[in-house]
Structures are given as C-alpha cells and as structure tokens.
Image (cartoon, rainbow, N blue to C red):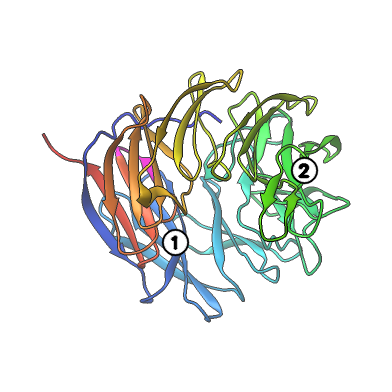
Amino acid sequence: MRIAADDRLTFPLRLVWKAPFVPENSLPMRVLPWRDRLFVVNHVSGADHATFSCLHARSGDLLWRREREAPGRTTIACVSDEGVIAYGTDWASPVCAYDLTNGEERWRNDRVRPGMDDAVLLDGAGQSAIKGTATGLDANAAIALDSGPEASQTIVVLDRRTGGIVWSRQYDGALAWPEVAIGDALIVMQESDAGVHGFVLAVDVATGEVRWRRDLRDAKRTWIATTKEWEKGSVESVTTDGTRALCNVTGGALIALDPATGETLWQYDADGGGFMRPLPVGDHLYTINRSTFYCLDASTGRLVFSESLGPDESWLRNTWCLADRVAIYGAGKFLIARHLDRGRMIWWFEGDANFAPPFAYGGRLYAGCLDGHVYCFEPQPE
C-alpha cells in the first residue's frame, strides 16, 4: 500500500500535549484517528473490562468514555463513518460496533470471536490495519478471523453497518491475520507447524476460494548453534506496495511474490535477523533489520543504499508512518524520524516506556505509550 505522506508534518517536532488514561496504570492497546477525533482502547491488567475513549485530536480533551466487558484485552479494529469496530483479543469476546459521537453500542455479533490483533476495512474508507485496498466486494465490508476455542482457521467477512455475515470459509490449518489486500485477493499467512507460518495463501475476497499457496519454509534457513541444526524459515509478516506481496521471512529474507500466481519475483537476503515491514515510497522500498536501514528497488529488489543504525534502535521496532520524505517509527521507548535520502536520523524523542506504532495525521504526530498516555507532537514554530 502506498502510505499517504502528511506533508504538513515538518521537523523538528515539539510535544504539544500528553493525555493520561483513566483508570491509572492502564495501557493503550491502539489509537486510531478519524476526522477530528482519536479513538483509544486501554486495558488494566487482570481486570475483566476495557476502557473505550474518544479524545479531541487537537486538544487531547476527553469527549466520552465507555467501559466494555471483555475477558481479555480489547483492540480497535477500524474506524469509519459507520462507527468504530472493536473486539477483545481473547476468543471469548464478540465483535461490536460503537457510535462515533457517544460510544453507544450499535451492533454486536456474538457468533464471530476474532481472538486476534486486527480486523480490516476492505475498501480503505476509514482508519484500520489494512495494507492495501481490495476490489470485488461490497464497499461496506469488514473482515475478521474467527478463532473460537479452536485454531484460527475461519475467515469471516462482515457488513460493518449491521454486523451481519457476508460470507465465511474454513481452511485446513491455522491462519494468521489476513491484513493484506491486493486487487481482489487477500494475502494470508498459514501455519505449517505449531507457531510457524511457513505458508502464504491468496484468497478471493468475494468467495474465500484459495487461488494459490506457497511454501516459504526453505526460502531462508537459520543456523541454530545450540541445536547445531538449520531451522526452517517462518513468515513473520506480509505487506504490499500495491503491486507485489512482500513477505518477511525469519533469518533476514524479504521476498516479493506475484499476487496473481504466487511466483517469486525477487528475494533480498541480509544478515542480522528479520526485516521490519517495508515502507513503499515511489519506486523504492525502505526497511530495517536489527542493525541496518535499507533502501531497495521495488521492482527488482536491488540494494540502492544502506545505513547503519544506532545501538538504541536495535530492538522492538514497529510500524512506520510517513511525512514528507521522512519515515517515523517507534523503537522501544524512542520515537525516531529518518529522512529517506540516505536514511539519516533527523529527530528523536525518548519517552518513559515503549511506544505503540505512531501515526501522522492532520499535521501532527500521535503515539500511544505504555506509560499510560497518548502523546501529541507538532512542528516547532520557526
């Protein structure tokens, strides 16, 4: 997916506000913006409920708050004019939609219990975890992965206006979250062994039919010194630049697949562990592994340049967001901005705990933090 750059976000940045969560010591699970609002779910460890809040994006003021009963943690799946869809990440929790203006429940589907991280809007008409835009399905559809007490192996498409099921289909093995759409296909990871996603599937978004299936376990093997054996690869993530399915395989392989056939278009290998999800900008892909910032040619996988990283960036990075030729991401308790020309660092901020993925929106940068706050930054005045 071509991530839209927020050209109004310029550097350096200053902290504008820092909004606390209530109750105290609760953790932000996800923050999503929509129009002039931020929607936040946070959870208190050991509690049987989550707090669902709406903040004003400019001021950080609390507009409303609701409690949601949930046996496990709760996440926001997606936000659009039809409402906010949320559910618990424990399989016993249903999918629910809430009104944007007051947080009242609009609908509840007790049959579908995702038990996973994200649901997605297929047409991109809102804020969600979708990487790409799908065609061939009703514009009001959202997708979920129904796990229940069994292994996660059923894809369910919901009408996000009513919560009704459009279609569902069960597969012969546990699936990871279908978070990539290319044209009229979903690209989905599937387990080959317990906890190992060795397979990648392409699924028709209108019917759920499997179009192709690739085994990537031998694409990159890792030598394990303790067992003195070669460990087969596992697909850690799949994303897209709108043309190719980009698979990140453990051990340090980035593989581009043809979404129509599943054939390998190119593979880039590097030492230093798996890659961060690549960021497509123009004809290039930008990614990071444990020690290096990379720029690759999107059509061939050829290395354009690389830049060594600082020691504080060597772990726990998360999803990018994009300003004008600047990539921003979280790395532990740091927010870091790097210019896409040669990958040089141009700004950083140190928090009191690890940051959730940041996002650029309306000329500002927002990020939830495990210190129990949402942070808001804006460009420093000249």
Who's the residue at 62% across and 46% down the image?
A: 120
Vertical placement of 9 versus 22: above or below? above
Q: Where does residue 353 sit, x and y in percent of width and height?
A: 36, 64
Residue 4 vs residue 271, the one in the foreground = 271
Cα gap from disc 2 to disc 1, whole angstroms? 48 Å
Vertical placement of 323 versus 310: above or below? above
The residue range painted magenta reads 358-363
Give the side of residue 75 with respect to residue 62, left or right.
Answer: right
Q: Which residue is mark 2?
A: 217
Q: Secondary structure at mark 1?
A: loop
Q: Quadrant of the N terminus?
A: top right
Q: Where does residue 305 sit, x and y in percent of width and height?
A: 44, 24
| 250 drawn magenta | no
Vertical placement of 6 versus 360: above or below? above
Task: Find residue 102 and name its label.
Answer: 1
Residue 2 vs residue 157, the one in the foreground = 2
- Residue 235: in sight, yes or no? yes
Residue 170 vs residue 59, the one in the foreground = 170
Kind of residue sitting beneath label 2: Arg
Q: Quadrant of the C terminus?
A: top left
